[in-house]
Amino acid sequence: MEKDPAHFVEEIRANVAFEHLVAAIVSGAALAAAIFFVLAFAGLTFAGALSAPNLLALILKSFTLCIMVFLIGFLAGALIVTSLFKTLEKAKRRSVWPYMAASIGVTGISLITLASLPNAGAPEMALIIAVITAGLFIAFDFGRRMSPLWRASERAEEQAVGNVRRLH
C-alpha cells in the first residue's frame, strides 16, 4: 500500500513545529526561573530576610519552577499544540493568536491546579507573574520562530496554485 506524500509533508511540518515549540519552551522556562528569582530576591531584600539559607532555598525554588514550566509546556505541546498545529495547517491559518489562547489556557489551568493542591497554599505573586509571563513568551517566541516557515509555506502554495487572494 502506497502512502500519501502529502501526509509525509504534514508530519514533517508538525515535527519541525514541535522542535521550534520545544526551543521556545526551554527559553520560556529559563525566563520564568529568572523572573521568579529576581522578584523573590527583591522581596527578601526589602523584607530584610536575605540570608544564605533563604538564598539557597530561592535558588532551589527557581530551579524547580524552571523544570516544572518545561515539563508542563512539553506535555501541553505534545498533547495540545501539535494537534492544534495540524488542524490550523489544514485550514491554512498561520498566526500566533491560536497558540496564545492555548498558552493562556494551559497557564490558567496550571495555576488553578497548583492553588488547589492540598497543603500547597496560595501561590506567591512572584510565581504567578513568572508563570504568566513565561506562557505568553513561549507563545510569542513560537510564533517568531515559525513565521519564516509560515511565509515560505504561503509562497510555495501561491506558486503552486498561481495568484491566490487571501480572504482572512
Image (cartoon, helix red, strand yellow):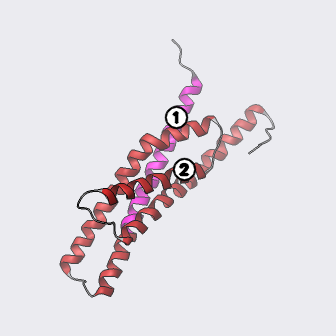
Q: Secondary structure at mark 1?
A: helix
Residue 107 higher or lower than 154, as above or below: below
Left or right relative to 12: residue 128? left
Residue 123: percent from left, percent from top: 33, 66
Residue 107 higher or lower than 55, as above or below: above
Residue located at (32% from left, 66% from top): 122
User: What amino acid does circle 2 point to?
Assistant: Tyr
Left or right relative to 41: residue 99? right
Residue located at (50% from left, 60% from top): 136
Q: CA distance from mark 1 to mark 2?
A: 19 Å
Of badges 1 and 2, nearer the viewer stands 2
Kindly give the residue lying farthest to the top in the view shown: 1
Q: Secondary structure at mark 2?
A: helix
Between 106 and 63, the one lying in front of the other is 106
Residue 118: percent from left, percent from top: 25, 57
Residue named by callout 1: 12
Magenta residue check for 131: no
Give the extent of the magenta segment. Answer: 5-34
Residue named by callout 2: 99
Kindly give the residue lying farthest to the left in the view shown: 53
Between 120 and 135, the one lying in front of the other is 120
Image quadrant assignment for residue 160: top right
